[in-house]
DNA sequence: CAGTGGTCTAGACCACGCG
DNA sequence: GCGTGGTCTAGACCACTGT
């Protein structure tokens, strides 16, 4: 029963109580919560009030609701670690068809990807990152990556058109080692990488593409690959489901 | 006006329409949306339906509502970049009082922090990361970091008690260069760092502490500092507001 | 079929900001 | 005082899942 005189809104009290019971393990992961109509009786509030409480928990990622079935405590997602430094090593590049395929195969999943290649003119952000002039032509590889038919990652890769003309980088299929291997074939030896990491809530498009549950943010990742002389060769904007990935970096102390 | 026969819920149509107008710049950043009662007339739906649409946009981080004032388009937050490799260099360590203070000062902000030191016994996660036995004593430094009195970061640092006994690491104030400098003073030369990055929605506690707007996730960051011989010296669990930080990493291609 | 969550209404009253 | 968002009710009907 909620305390009417406390000044705390009823739906917050209900949400807080349920949250506490989930944290205490009273409702275990995967377990079903009492139905909304039961909660109405338990707490002595109306159904919209109960629903507002449940919505709160959903947007925190604590529960999911399934139409016609019930509301369930979300089991902790299995995160997969993604170690940037080793997965992009030259050795890894030579052994397989790009880092993504290598990762998935190593985990016993069947990787697949839809690739679409197009060409566009650099906007200011792209021009800055690739150190080219605004309006210069860039090759864009737009990829949707799946593991066992579940979309796990979106990636948009951009390169100065000069670097890709006449290479298979302008084909959907780039062959063993992926784009980076083809760049090195063409004489552009890789020198270094940078990655910038952020997080935000997904757009509705991303929610449906990545099949995200409520309350799951996306990790945004922008990688730039530089040549041995420091020239930017490629930038790659990636979007990952935050409940499925954890990024890992390592570097020497000095 | 919503289309009643489309099968798309009314609140989604309203949310979609508003989202489109925000994306198109029809409602510019910082600008006020029409009041809920106006939207009721515009779309021909009830007020709870309008509110559900607005709630959707809030949990996407697109708008904020201010009681008694109105609903406003959220202006893009100013992110501050945080380059892991350079900010933790030995040079940076010698010049100031830890990386956080150096960052804030460089940006013209007044840094402050509340530090609380306590001792606890390692649970399985901590034991694994620090390569000690479960139950071993660890020194815990619990910090709330502020820039101009705004809380920007939470950090919980843990070290094996053996390494800190008799050092100022067990005091709230660790002096120039912070914990890492004191570890090196004690003969524990740093060898490497690892950082694991994830994202999730904040708990209610974090929301109020970090003064997070709706629809803003937090970035979780676990750093482990290793000695030159590979022994873990410290682990640091950090929580950052995702709309205020962007992490940056760089490493050589091979 | 019964039970679940999903959508929606037409109100009511409260709390806050501002002129 | 007036307009704003915040909270809450007591229903109604729909859509989906299971038996």
Image: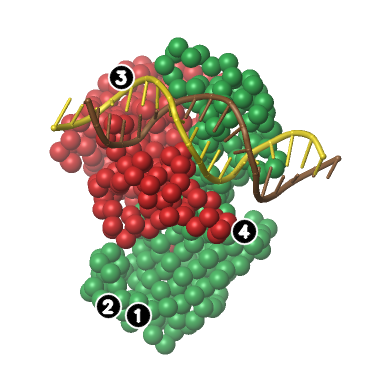
Chain colours: A green, B red, C yellow, D brown
Q: CA distance from mark 4 to mark 1?
A: 31 Å
Residue at point 60%, 40% (across, down): A64
Provide residue A225's location: percent of width, then percent of height.
37, 65
Residue at point 33%, 26% (across, down): B144
Return the disc, 4 or 1, that comes first in the chain's sequence.
4
Q: Nearer the viewer, mark 3 or mark 2?
A: 2
Residue at point 53%, 29% (across, down): A49
Tag 2 secondary structure: loop
The residue wearing badge 3 is B172
Which quadrant of the structure image shows residue B100?
top left
Tags 2 and 1 touching, CB below 8 Å: yes
Tags 3 and 2 touching, CB below 8 Å: no
Q: Residues within 10 Å of mark 2 (few under 14, many from 20)?
A: some
The answer to whether one can see residue A120 in this image is yes
Tags 1 and 3 touching, CB below 8 Å: no
The residue wearing badge 4 is A150
């Amino acid at each position: 029963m909620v305390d009417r005189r406390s000044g705390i809104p009823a739906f917050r009290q209900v949400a807080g109580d349920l949250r506490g019971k989930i944290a205490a393990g009273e409702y275990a992961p995967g377990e079903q919560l009492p139905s909304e109509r039961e909660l109405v009786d338990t707490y002595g509030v109306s159904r919209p009030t109960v629903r507002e409480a449940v919505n709160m928990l959903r947007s925190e990622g604590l529960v999911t609701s399934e139409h016609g079935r019930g509301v369930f405590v979300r089991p902790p997602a299995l995160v997969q670690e993604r170690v940037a430094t080793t997965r992009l090593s030259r050795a890894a590049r030579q052994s397989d068809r790009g880092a993504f395929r290598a990762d998935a195969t190593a985990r016993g999943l069947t990787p697949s990807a839809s690739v679409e290649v197009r060409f566009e003119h650099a906007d200011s952000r792209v021009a800055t990152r690739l150190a080219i002039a605004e309006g210069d032509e860039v090759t864009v590889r737009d990829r949707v990556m799946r593991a066992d038919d579940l979309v796990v990652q979106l990636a948009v890769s951009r390169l100065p058109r000069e670097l890709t003309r006449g290479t298979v980088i302008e084909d959907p299929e780039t062959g063993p080692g992926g784009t980076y291997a083809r760049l090195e074939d063409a004489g552009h030896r890789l020198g270094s990488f940078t990655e910038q990491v952020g997080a935000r809530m997904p757009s509705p498009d991303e929610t449906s593409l990545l099949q995200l549950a409520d309350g799951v943010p996306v990790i945004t990742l922008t990688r730039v690959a530089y040549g041995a002389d420091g020239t930017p060769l490629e930038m790659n904007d990636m979007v990952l489901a935050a409940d499925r990935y954890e990024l890992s970096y390592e570097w020497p102390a000095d």
